[in-house]
Image (spheres, helix red, strand yellow):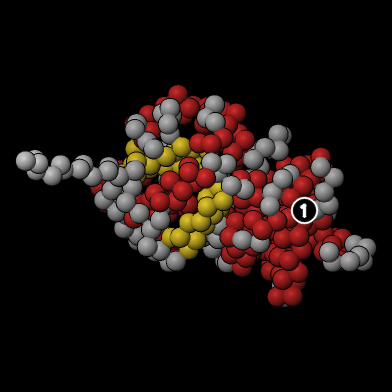
Amino acid sequence: MPGPPRRTRAARPARAAVFSAGSWGTAFAKVLADAGSDVVLHARRNEIAEAINTRRRNPGYFPDTALPPNLTATTDPAAALDGADHLVLSIPAQSLRSNLTAWAPYIGPRTVIVSLIKGIEQGTGKRASEVIAETSGVPADRIAVLSGPNLAREIATGQPAAATIACPDETTARTFQAACRAPYFRPYTSTDVIGCELGGAVKNVIALAVGIATGMSLGHNTAAMLITRGLAETTRLATALGAEPATLAGLAGLGDLTATCSSPLSRNRTFGTHLGRGLTIAQATATTEQTTEGVKSAQAILDLARAHHIDMPITDVVAQLLREEVTLGQAAAALMQRPAKPEH
């Protein structure tokens, strides 16, 4: 006679380590937890980790947002990475190499690394995925990037959003897609890592330009011009480096660009607005407080474009402003006095 039916063990939840506990790191850790993953958030400060574990709040960024019980925090990178299926990196692009060098010994042999970073490394012109591969030794099929119109505060409160997960290995992208598919967060997959990363990095520089125009009390026509022509120069650079044009027309391109250039929640747009109102770079930096990737990456993006003979006039003017080589009036004139030519 046949025996009793065999019981099948339920699959354990995916385990994710999110570094670090800033606004986007915390918001995305909540997405992963709401999607069913067990999440450990790595915080630099003991008081932040303790508040998350005891009060279910991150007082530094979202003091009024309750965090789910399957999201805990630690200041110990080894503990955060112990048994992690996914390592999610939400740290400044310019500190990625040094931080990941310190964390690499704790990364498991099958852990997938996912970058939320939207910047280009100064001095090397490398994208985050390239820095991750060099620093960690993890192969490209275990490195993914996530990008899209993702304003952290809106996502932390459960407002609907979407993003693109790009990885050379489609199975890796789909696995992480399942791990972060929350009721309010819809991820799509792609194999175009270059397009996703450059769309996310360059849009920050274009948002600075839109913010500057806003601070100078210029109108919606100016903002629309900068967004549209900003997308054009982003696409030129990305496709020259091997990206698919469709990626730049999607969530990681146009979608992210629109949100970052339009919302007062955007740090890059806000930083640009401060400059447009007459604040110095030092004053705008002090006022903004959080890392503004466009400020750090503008020159690196421009250098990358010049190395590949790509014309990026908006990025060029923003970089000149950040180097304090031109005034606001000179920057506006430089853009409007460019030679007339066909749009495409």
Query: What's the amino acid at mark 1?
Result: Arg
Q: Quadrant of residue 109?
A: top left
The residue most toward the top is 105
Residue at 84% x, 66% y: name it.
343
As drawn, is 229 to the left or to the right of 138? right
- Crowd rating for badge 1 (residues with CA inside 10 Å; few <14, some 14–19, many 20+): some
- Up-down: is 303 above or below 180? above
- Up-down: is 340 above or below 146? below
User: Which percent across, then down, holds residue 65?
Assistant: 35, 60
Residue at 46% x, 29% y: name it.
103
As drawn, is 256 to the left or to the right of 58? right
As drawn, is 190 to the left or to the right of 187? right
As drawn, is 110 to the left or to the right of 207? left
Q: 265 or 89: nearer the eye? A: 89
Answer yes or no: is residue 294 visible: no
Q: Quadrant of residue 330?
A: bottom right
On the rendered image, what quadrant is the N terminus found in? top left
Residue at 43% x, 60% y: name it.
185
User: Which percent across, then down, holds residue 68?
Assistant: 29, 54
- Up-down: is 141 above or below 311? above
The residue most toward the front is 1
The residue most toward the right is 339
User: Which percent across, then down, holds residue 37?
Assistant: 33, 47
On the rendered image, what quadrant is the C terminus found in? bottom right
What is the total number of numbered labels drawn onto the structure image?
Answer: 1
Answer yes or no: is residue 34 visible: yes
Q: Quadrant of residue 218?
A: bottom right
In terms of secondary structure, where does tag 1 sit?
helix
Mark 1 lies on residue: 236
Residue at 66% x, 61% y: name it.
249
User: Which percent across, then down, holds residue 69?
Assistant: 26, 50
